[in-house]
């Protein structure tokens, strides 16, 4: 599945403090090493955030932020792609699929993630079972 299938109003970025600070200071970010290597910004749907955190960020427990991003502001640069038979993730390539930075004006809010009882928590995740 590619394109805008299953597109919601928001997508989410798990962002280390340094990336979040740089995004606020400069107005955009190309993300981390993985993003620059693959040529797109890795994002998640809200119901994917917790498993992404547990699978990829468990050793980085401090100084992580969850960014809520207005999917509409990413336009056709936001693509939903299947990574296996069960998971479709949003990826931001930028216009015309030319790797572009994630713009600050698409970010609705950023909130610090904390670990409680072995799970990452913040107000945005409280509505997810």
Image (cartoon, helix red, strand yellow):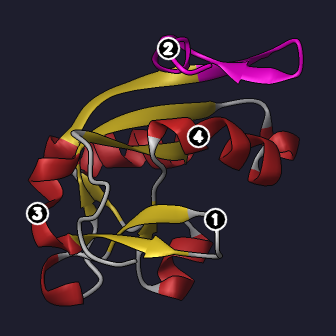
Q: Which residues are magenta?
A: 113-129
Give the mark nearest the N terminus, 1 or 3.
Answer: 3
Mark pair 2, 3: CA separation: 26 Å
Circle 4 SS class: helix
Label 4: how many residues lie within 10 Å, few (<14), some (14-19) or many (20+)? many
Is 4 part of what is drawn in magenta? no
What residue is rendered at 30% in x and 83% in y?
Answer: 99
Q: Alpha carbon of mark 1 to alpha carbon of mark 3: how far? A: 25 Å
Report the residue marked by disc 1. Answer: 86
Q: Of helix, strand and loop, which one carries label 3?
A: helix
Q: What secondary structure is found at the residue carrying circle 1?
A: loop
Chain-order first, disc 4 or disc 1? 4
Residue 106: where, in percent of width, then height? Answer: 18, 45
Sequence-first disc among 4 and 3: 4
Residue drawn 44% across the image and 74% down it:
81
Q: Position of residue 86 (x, y in %)?
A: 64, 65
Residue at (12% x, 50% y) in the render? 72
* Residue 77 rendering spot, x and y as whole percentages: 20, 72
Q: Secondary structure at mark 2?
A: loop
Q: How many marks?
A: 4
Q: Residues within 10 Å of mark 1 (few under 14, many from 20)?
A: few
Q: Which residue is mark 3?
A: 75
């Amino acid at each position: 599945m590619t394109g805008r299938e299953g597109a919601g109003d928001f997508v989410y970025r798990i962002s280390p403090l340094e990336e979040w600070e740089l995004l606020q200071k400069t107005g955009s970010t190309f993300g981390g090493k993985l993003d620059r290597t693959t040529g797109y910004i890795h994002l998640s749907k809200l119901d994917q955030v917790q498993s992404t955190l547990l699978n990829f960020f468990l050793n980085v427990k401090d100084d992580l932020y969850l960014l809520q991003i207005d999917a509409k502001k990413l336009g056709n640069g936001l693509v939903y792609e299947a990574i296996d038979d069960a998971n479709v993730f949003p990826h931001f390539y930028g216009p015309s699929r030319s790797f572009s930075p994630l713009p600050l004006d698409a970010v609705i809010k950023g909130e610090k993630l904390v670990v409680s009882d072995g799970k990452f928590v913040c107000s945005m995740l409280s509505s997810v079972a």
